Amino acid sequence: MTGADRGLGQARPLRVCLAASGGGHVRQLLDLESAWGGHDVFFVSEDSGLTRTLRKDWPVEFVTHVALGQGRLGAPLKMIASAISNFFQSLWVVARRRPHVVVTTGAGSVYFTVLISKLLGAKVLVIESLARFEVMSAFARIAGPLADEKVLQSPALSKFWPTAPVFDPIRRLEGNRPEKDPVMLVTVGATLPFDRMVDSVLELARRGEIPERIVIQTGVGGLSDPAFECHETLPLDDLLARLRKADIVVCHGGTGSLITALREGCRVVAMPRLFERGEHYDDHQAEITGAFAARGLIEVAHSTEQLSEALARARSKTPVMATSDPEGLRRRLTERLDEWSRPNRR
C-alpha cells in the first residue's frame, strides 16, 4: 500500500487473495462472493477442472498440490519435492500480487501462500473447513497462529479455538426438488481418482442392479468403462446442469460434492475415501459422511454390497434437499474486510 493510500480517510478496495485447494474448499469461498466481490480478488489453488472453470470470471494462480498426508501414504520424497515447488510458486505469486488480505479455507497447497503473505504484512482470515466436525485439520493447526481472524463451522471445534466465532451453515431446504431424469451421476470430486467407488458402481451395473442411465466423472487417470459415459473431469457449469437432472448421485465424502448434490435435490449416496486403503491423507471423509448421515441427509456405503443396500434405501425415501447457508459467515467476512480496508488497516 502506498503512502497516498494511507493518507486517505475513506475505505479503499482491498487486494484479496482467496486461497484454497481445488474442490469443496474453493466452492465454499465462492459461496462467500457477496462479501469479497467488491474487492480486487484473485484465487490461489491447485489446477483442477473446477479451478480452470474459475478462470472465466476471476484471475487464478495455480500452485503444485502438496499435503502432509503424502508422507503418511508413503511418498515423503514426493511431498518434499512438491513442497519445494509450491514454495517458490507461492513466493512468485505473492511477490507479484502483494495481497492486503488472505482469506483461506485450506488446505496444504496454500499454506506457503498464507505464510509468505503474512510475512509481507497481509491480514489473514482462516476459516476452518466445513469438512471438519470433531477434529481440527492439520492446515488449521499450522495456519491458525498466522491468523488475524479465525472462524469455525462446527461447535465441537471450539475446544481448540475457544475465542473463534462459530457459524454452522448446513440447513434443510423446503419446496419441491427439480424435475429429474432416471440418471445416476457418479462423481469422484475435483482432485483425486477414486477407483474403488467407481468399480463398485460398475459391478452393480453389470449385475443389473442399477436401472438408471449411468454417467461417471472418474478423475484424471481414473477407472473407466467404454460401456458407460465416462469423463475424467467436468466443468463446473456442466456438472451443475447434470446434477439438476440426475435423480441419484453417488459420490465421495467431500463436502463440496455432498452439498452441491443435496442443493439440487438428488438422492445422495456417499462412499468416503479411507486412509487405510491409501485413498486419502486421513479419515476426515468418514467423519463428514457420518455427520451428514446423522442429520438424515445422505446414505453411506463402504463396500459394493453396502452400496447396493444404500441405493435401495435412497430410492425408497423421499429425497431431502439441503444447502450450505453461510450468511453469518458472509456478514463476519464483510465486517472484517470493511475494517481492514480503512486507512489504518496496516
Image (cartoon, rainbow, N blue to C red):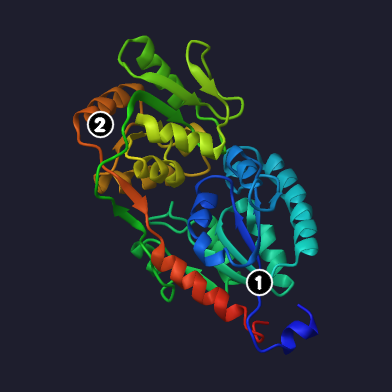
Residue 314 is tagged as 2
The residue at which mark 1 appears reads as 14
Q: Which of 74 and 125 is in front in this view?
A: 125
Q: Nearer the viewer, residue 177 or 321?
A: 177
Q: Is residue 83 above or below residue 112?
A: above
Q: Distance between the residues labelled 1 and 2?
A: 46 Å
Residue 125 is tagged as none
Image coords of residue 163 (percent x, y)? 43, 76
Left of 268 or right of it: where is 3?
A: right
Left of 296 or right of it: where is 274?
A: right
Q: Which of 233 and 106 is in front in this view?
A: 233
Q: Is residue 327 above or below residue 81?
A: below
Image coords of residue 107 (percent x, y)? 57, 53
What's the residue at 35%, 50% (across, down)? 323
Which quadrant of the structure image shows residue 263? top left
Tag 1–tag 2 contact (CB < 8 Å): no
Residue 271 seen from this side? no
Q: What residue type is labelled 1?
A: Leu
What's the residue at 61%, 25% (across, down)? 221
> Quadrant location of the C terminus?
bottom right
What's the residue at 74%, 72% (across, down)? 120
Image coords of residue 180 (percent x, y)? 32, 30
* Chain-order first, disc 1 or disc 2: 1
Q: Is residue 151 above or below residue 129?
A: below
Secondary structure beneath dot 2 equals helix
Q: What residue type is labelled 2?
A: Ala
What's the residue at 30%, 15% (across, down)? 209
Image coords of residue 303 (percent x, y)? 35, 26
